[in-house]
Image (cartoon, rainbow, N blue to C red):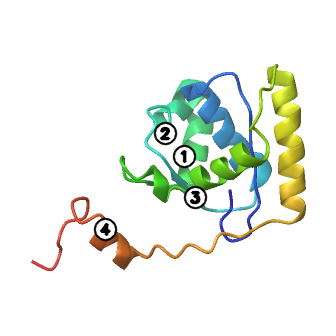
């Protein structure tokens, strides 16, 4: 999800492997934002979400090119509620996935239809949780740099 525009992109796959993540990063860089010099990516700490995954999937020059365009920020390990994608996934779950869907093909079709409908009237995310509020709420995760 792009927080400022509310634009969604969802990919439904059978698994969540390192190779799948690398292919999604290539899609992000080469298809969605081919002219962007830098892509700021906020994501969780899943073990497959690592730049090394790019090198598992692509030749070194391609992996290096993709990695060089990313500015990665990880949400705190116990702070997935901070992840805007998690919030959007909850919306997807309530609006689209709240029933049994019998096949991967049908799931892909249903999610694509939901994504298209959502992107026709995108909802930007107005994030109110500031760095200052995070330092208070997550005091154990942030060192006190004033000392």
| Distance (Cα) linking label 2 and label 3 | 21 Å
Label 3 vs 4, first from the N-terminus: 3
Q: Residues within 10 Å of mark 3 (few under 14, many from 20)?
A: some
Quadrant location of the N terminus in the rendered image: bottom right
Marks 3 and 1 close (CB-CB < 8 Å): no
Instruction: Please say if 109 is above or below 134.
Output: above
Q: Residue 3: x, y in percent?
A: 65, 66
Instruction: Please say if 104 is above or below 126.
Output: above
Label 1 vs 2, first from the N-terminus: 2
Label 2 vs 3, first from the N-terminus: 2
Q: State the residue in front, 30 or 134.
A: 134
Instruction: Determine whether the residue tagged by mark 3 lies in a helix, strand or loop.
Output: helix
Marks 4 and 1 close (CB-CB < 8 Å): no
In the drawing, what numbered circle is on residue 67?
A: 1
Q: Quadrant of residue 139?
A: bottom left
In the drawing, what numbered circle is on residue 137?
A: 4
Q: Residues within 10 Å of mark 2 (few under 14, many from 20)?
A: some
| Distance (Cα) linking label 4 and label 2 | 29 Å
| Distance (Cα) linking label 3 and label 1 | 22 Å
Q: Residue 102: x, y in percent?
A: 81, 20
Label 3 vs 1, first from the N-terminus: 1
Residue receiving disc 3: 84
Instruction: Determine whether the residue tagged by mark 2 lies in a helix, strand or loop.
Output: helix
Q: Residue 13: x, y in percent?
A: 71, 27
In the drawing, what numbered circle is on residue 51?
A: 2
Quadrant location of the C terminus in the rendered image: bottom left
């Amino acid at each position: 999800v792009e927080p400022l525009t509310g634009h969604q992109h969802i990919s439904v796959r059978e698994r969540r492997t390192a190779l799948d993540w690398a292919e999604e990063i290539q899609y992000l860089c080469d298809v969605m934002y081919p002219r962007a010099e830098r892509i700021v990516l906020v994501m969780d700490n899943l073990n497959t979400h690592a730049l090394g995954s790019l090198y598992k999937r692509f030749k070194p020059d391609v992996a290096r090119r993709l990695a060089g365009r990313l500015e990665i920020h990880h949400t705190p390990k116990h702070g997935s509620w901070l992840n805007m994608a998690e919030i959007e996934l909850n919306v997807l779950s309530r609006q689209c996935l709240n029933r049994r869907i019998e096949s991967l093909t049908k799931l892909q079709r249903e999610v694509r239809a939901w994504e298209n409908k959502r992107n026709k009237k995108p909802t930007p995310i107005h994030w109110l949780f500031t760095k200052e509020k995070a330092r208070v709420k997550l005091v154990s995760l942030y060192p006190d740099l004033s000392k």
